[in-house]
Image: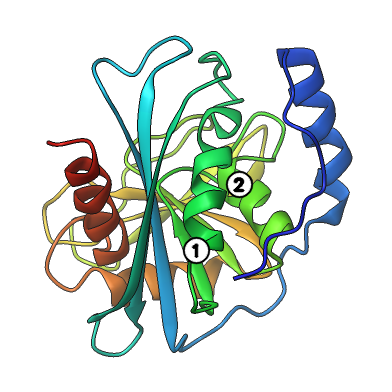
Amino acid sequence: MEVLDLHAWPSTPAKAEAIQDRLRPMLELDVPGPARPRTVAGLDVSYAGDGGGTGTRLAAAAVVLDGATLDVVEQSVAVGTATFPYVPGLFAFRELPTLLDALRALKTTPDLLVCDGFGVAHPRRFGLACHLGVLTGLPTIGVGKTAFVGAYENPGGRRGDTSPLLDDGEVIGRVLRTRDGVKPVFVSVGHRTDLETACRNVLDLAPGYRLPETTRRADRLSRDALGG
């Protein structure tokens, strides 16, 4: 699939933040997202060792699922090295170069990308899902296991219950219960979709577990590529 080459990879946090600021106006937010995507790609990255520092070996996986059956349509994995340091809010710059290699190897162009991370639920409103959305032009959402920024009240205990994720009064995402009595996930928009549709898609992708099948399959593929 095609990925745009919109910038060089930065060497410093200041240059990385400047790229986020330059690309953020390109986001298309609150537009109707794909209600019934035919294909959905899950994206995840695993690290060797503790994952810290530069020079760490990593594997990025892209797994395309049939949107109706959740069967695997295609998958791709790329192995690389983290060349950017771990800096909160700039995690995308560690993972994107290898993630994009995995995406470029796909023959399928999915209708929706689901990232293990965040979209606008980010200090500069430009997380990994936003960055991937701009570079691919595809509808993209982020599904985080924990909150990065923002405050919230716990949603109800039943599957499908939600509460807003707020930062300075702004709704930046939604806290979504995907299973009865199980910890919620944190859904935020990345590009070319609305929050309501994003949450419906996450529920459809999570029929039996807390995390969507896209994340579960991509996580396993990336771990296997590192031998674990």
Query: Where is residue 154 drawn, in percent x and y?
Result: 31, 43
**What's the residue type where badge 2 is placed?**
Ile
User: Can you give x and y, in whole percent of width and height, for residue 66 in the image?
Assistant: 33, 84
Which residue is at a point 24% across and 65% down the rendered structure image? 213
For disc 1, the neighbor class at 10 Å (few under 14, some 14 to 19, many from 20) is some
Q: Tell me the residue that label 1 is attached to.
A: 105
Q: Position of residue 187 (x, y in %)?
A: 45, 54
The quadrant of the rendering that contains the C terminus is: top left
Regarding mark 1 in the picture, which secondary structure is present there?
loop
Q: Is residue 173 visible?
A: no
User: For mark 2, does the 10 Å Cα neighbourhood hold few (<14), some (14 to 19), or many (20 or more) residues?
Assistant: many
**Residue at position x 48%, y 69% in the image:** 106
Frontmost residue, 152 versus 177: 177
Left or right: 166, with 187 as reference point: right
Q: Which residue is mark 2?
A: 172
Q: Of 167 and 94, which appears nearest the observer?
A: 94
- Distance in Å between CA atoms under marks 1 and 2: 32 Å
Q: Is residue 167 above or below residue 55?
A: below
Dot in front, 1 or 2: 1
Residue type marked 1: Ala
Task: Give residue 6's mark.
Answer: none
Q: Residue at x 46, y 89 (%)?
A: 36
Which picture quadrant has residue 60?
top left
Q: Nearer the viewer, residue 115 or 154?
A: 115
For residue 36, side relative to residue 185 (left or right): right
Can see residue 184? yes
Taking the spot 66% from the left edge, 58% from the top edge, the residue there is: 133
Query: Helix, strand or loop at disc 2?
Result: strand
Residue 8 versus residue 184 in the image, above or below: above
